[in-house]
Image (cartoon, rainbow, N blue to C red):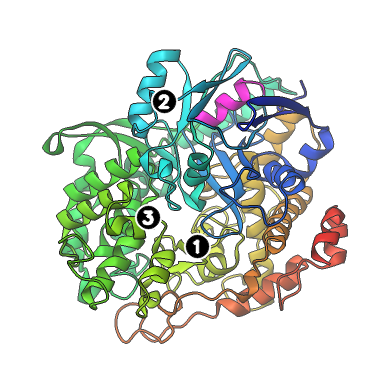
């Protein structure tokens, strides 16, 4: 075993029930770190071009970050990666909780799954023994029931599993751990379901070897003490309310999309309605804090809701509240709790589910579908009980739910009649619940990142609101002075923040780590691995990972540079009232400037040959040229 990582990954083929271990050289970790950086390299090398993402050749990867499993603050994330069946591009999804560190405790830096089982199976890796077991007893159960059943059978284990939506191959379904932490985006629940894989159950006994354990503990203790002593600011907000702190602020500022991206605060969802779903109202039902492994902030919470006979459920995140709240003109808090719970259990992505329901309501409102199509449902704005019924139909693929279960882009292709204008997606993935007219750099991310439609990809306006904006996040990581103004310095900043996102994800860091305090990143990496790594090398690693994700997508036949966002998302035509009145964002110029900085052709997004060579990605040249 090497310092911090094991140098070993596990391949499992469900078609023939085989598994093997591959040993990786240190060089690959130094170039790709872990997480989806390491996943990108391995999947690019092993997945045939144009493979069916729901077919036998498809690879589904589970990868903890390089620092995941240590006590390094905010490093408990893991990533699921592969080809997205929803967008046809590179896909990745991110989750916290305690499953990612357990992969490391099992002695692996990644688990890659191929093939399709003949009958439902689940995988166990318990005390060094890998097994593929019959899942007939848990197939058909929801994710919470599945986890409970498997823990009852196997003891103190960590479980990642799918619910009913994934079993039914919903392309807007994800993979669930810790009974409600979900790697929700990119449609990987459907990939797991297509493989007839119900769950992965882990219990490890390996300890991570650190280059300098005392130094890592010292830096960790110092950072965590500063977090504990911090009052006010993002730290206190997240400790108290988590992401629901944005329910009123984002809604009232113009950040939250309203009425399927066509409405505005004043006319459609005024502050008095936002206040009904505020963080304060939600936290009246809070029982205790919930935090991911190695997190000193603990922004989650476990709730008890007697009115709904719910004894234990995760607090809904901002994205869920926005998608089932203002996006649908719904201020019924009990319905949002209900929708959060049923989606967590079914493994349904709440962003895509909310966006798809909004699409259906607008189709109903405009006469493109009627009660005959909806089995009698009256799909109107804010009709919370009908919304709950529709989401249950989506989960079970019943009636119109079968059409909607793959997201609103595919639904619009089946409904026709001009319904595509109500499908607010990027290449089929419903846009995250932050308005690109409010934070214009999201237009670049939504349209052109290899995982399109995601608010968690790099966006300078999303992350440059704390220590990063003061150039006080990571020693030596400096943004250009005028990064908020359109022009060369902003394009440079786009590149830098993009790299930050890539290497942070690949290290296993929470995206909110950029919003709290100065982070001792270089020091922690050195203490863990022994590497004398510089910020310049980390930036280059981030650009390498992003460029490989881009190359993967191009190899699959998707030219992101040709992608266009729906007019509502960019202000085309400009809104006539509300906070975005008269505003249209120029996301295409942002992308061209970004491409020039990162070394891609600004016309088509192809990485230049010299860029590929400089990033040690010369193996990609034959696929693109």
Residue 429 horizontal side relative to residue 494, left or right: left
* Labelled disc at residue 242: none
Residue 87 spot, x, y in % from top left:
54, 60
Q: Which quadrant of the structure image shows residue 422?
A: bottom left
Of the image marks 3 and 1, the number of the one nearer the N terminus: 3
Tell me what residue is drawn at x 71 percent, y 41 percent: 38
Q: Give the mark nearer the N terminus: 3 vs 2.
A: 2
Name, please, the residue furthest toward the front: 118
Dot 3 surroundings within 10 Å: few (below 14), some, or many (20 or more)? many
User: Is residue 221 or residue 180 the one in the foreground?
Assistant: 180
Question: What is the quadrant of the C terminus in the image?
Answer: bottom right
Residue 254 is at least partly visible in this image: yes
Based on the displayed image, in which of its 4 quarters is residue 360 positioned? Answer: bottom left
The boundaries of the magenta stretch are 99-107
Q: Residue at x 65, y 43 (%)?
A: 506
Q: Secondary structure at mark 3?
A: loop
Residue 508 rendering spot, x and y as whole percentages: 60, 39
Name the residue beneath numbered marker 2.
136
Q: Is residue 31 magenta?
A: no
Label 1 Cα crowd, 10 Å radius (few <14 / some 14-19 / many 20+): many
Query: Between marks 3 and 1, how big is the CA–CA gap?
Result: 18 Å
On the image, the x and y values in percent for residue 220 come to 58, 29
Residue receiving disc 3: 405
Work out whether residue 40 or residue 207 is closer to the camera in this orientation and state it.
Answer: 40
Outermost residue, left direction?
Answer: 307
Mark 1–mark 2 Cα distance, whole angstroms, equals 35 Å
Residue situated in front as seen by the camera: 302 or 156? 156
Residue at image x 32%, y 58%? 354
Residue 381 coordinates in the image, percent (x, y): 20, 67
- Tell me the residue that label 1 is attached to: 453
**Which element type, helix, strand or loop, lies under badge 2?**
loop
Marks 3 & 1, CB-CB < 8 Å contact:
no
């Amino acid at each position: 075993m090497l310092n911090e990582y094991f140098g070993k990954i596990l391949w499992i083929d469900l078609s023939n029930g085989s598994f093997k271990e591959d040993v990786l050289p240190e060089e690959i970790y130094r170039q790709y770190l872990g997480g989806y950086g390491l996943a990108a390299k391995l999947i690019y090398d092993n997945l045939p071009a144009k493979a069916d993402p729901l077919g036998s050749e498809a690879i589904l990867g589970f990868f903890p970050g390089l620092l995941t499993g240590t006590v390094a603050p905010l490093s408990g994330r893991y990533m699921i990666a592969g080809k997205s069946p929803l967008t046809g591009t590179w896909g990745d999804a991110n989750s916290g909780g305690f499953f990612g560190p357990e992969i490391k405790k099992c002695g692996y830096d990644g688990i890659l799954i191929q093939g399709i089982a003949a009958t439902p199976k689940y995988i166990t890796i318990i005390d060094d023994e890998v097994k593929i077991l019959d899942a007939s007893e848990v197939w058909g159960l929801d994710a919470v029931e599945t986890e409970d059943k498997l823990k009852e059978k196997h003891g103190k284990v960590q479980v990642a599993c799918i619910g009913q939506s994934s079993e039914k191959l919903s392309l807007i379904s994800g993979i669930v751990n810790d009974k409600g932490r979900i790697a929700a985006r990119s449609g990987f629940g459907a990939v797991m379901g297509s493989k007839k894989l119900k769950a992965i159950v882990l219990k490890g006994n390996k300890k991570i070897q650190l280059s300098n354990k005392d130094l890592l503990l010292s830096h960790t203790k110092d950072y965590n003490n500063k977090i504990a002593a911090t009052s006010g600011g993002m730290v206190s907000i997240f400790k108290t309310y988590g992401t629901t702190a944005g329910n009123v602020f984002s809604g009232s500022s113009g950040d939250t999309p309203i009425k399927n991206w066509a409405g505005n605060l004043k006319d459609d969802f005024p502050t008095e309605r936002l206040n009904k779903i505020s963080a304060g109202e939600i936290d009246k039902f809070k029982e205790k804090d919930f935090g991911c492994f190695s997190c000193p902030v603990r922004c989650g919470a476990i709730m008890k809701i007697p009115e709904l006979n719910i004894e234990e459920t995760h607090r809904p995140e901002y994205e869920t509240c926005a998608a089932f709240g203002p996006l649908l003109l719904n201020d019924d808090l009990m319905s949002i709790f209900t929708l959060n719970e049923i989606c967590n259990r079914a493994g349904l992505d709440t962003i895509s589910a909310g966006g798809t329901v909004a699409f259906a309501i607008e189709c109903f409102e405009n006469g493109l579908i009627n009660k005959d199509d909806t089995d009698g449902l009256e799909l109107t704005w804010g009709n919370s009980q009908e919304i709950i019924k529709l989401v249950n139909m989506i989960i079970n693929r019943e009636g119109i739910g079968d059409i909607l279960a793959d997201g609103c882009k595919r639904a619009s292709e089946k409904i026709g009649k001009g319904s595509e204008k109500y499908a607010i997606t990027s290449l089929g993935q419903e846009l995250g619940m932050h308005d690109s007219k409010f934070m214009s750099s999201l237009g670049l991310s939504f349209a052109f990142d290899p995982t399109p439609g995601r608010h968690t990809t790099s966006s300078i306006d999303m992350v440059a609101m704390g220590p990063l904006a003061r150039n006080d996040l990571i020693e030596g990581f400096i943004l250009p002075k005028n990064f908020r103004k359109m022009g060369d310095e902003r394009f440079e900043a786009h590149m830098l923040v993009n790299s930050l996102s890539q290497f942070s994800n690949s290290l296993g860091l929470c995206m909110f780590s950029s919003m709290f305090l100065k982070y001792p990143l270089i020091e922690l990496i050195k203490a863990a691995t022994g590497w004398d790594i510089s910020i310049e090398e980390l930036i280059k690693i981030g650009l390498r990972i992003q460029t490989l994700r881009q190359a993967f997508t191009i190899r699959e036949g998707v030219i992101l540079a040709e992608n266009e966002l729906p007019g509502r998302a960019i202000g085309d035509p400009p809104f006539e009232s509300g906070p975005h009145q008269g505003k249209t964002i120029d996301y295409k110029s942002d992308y061209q400037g970004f491409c020039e900085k990162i070394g891609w052709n600004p016309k088509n997004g192809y990485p230049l040959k010299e860029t590929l060579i400089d990033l040690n990605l010369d193996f990609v040249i034959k696929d693109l040229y």
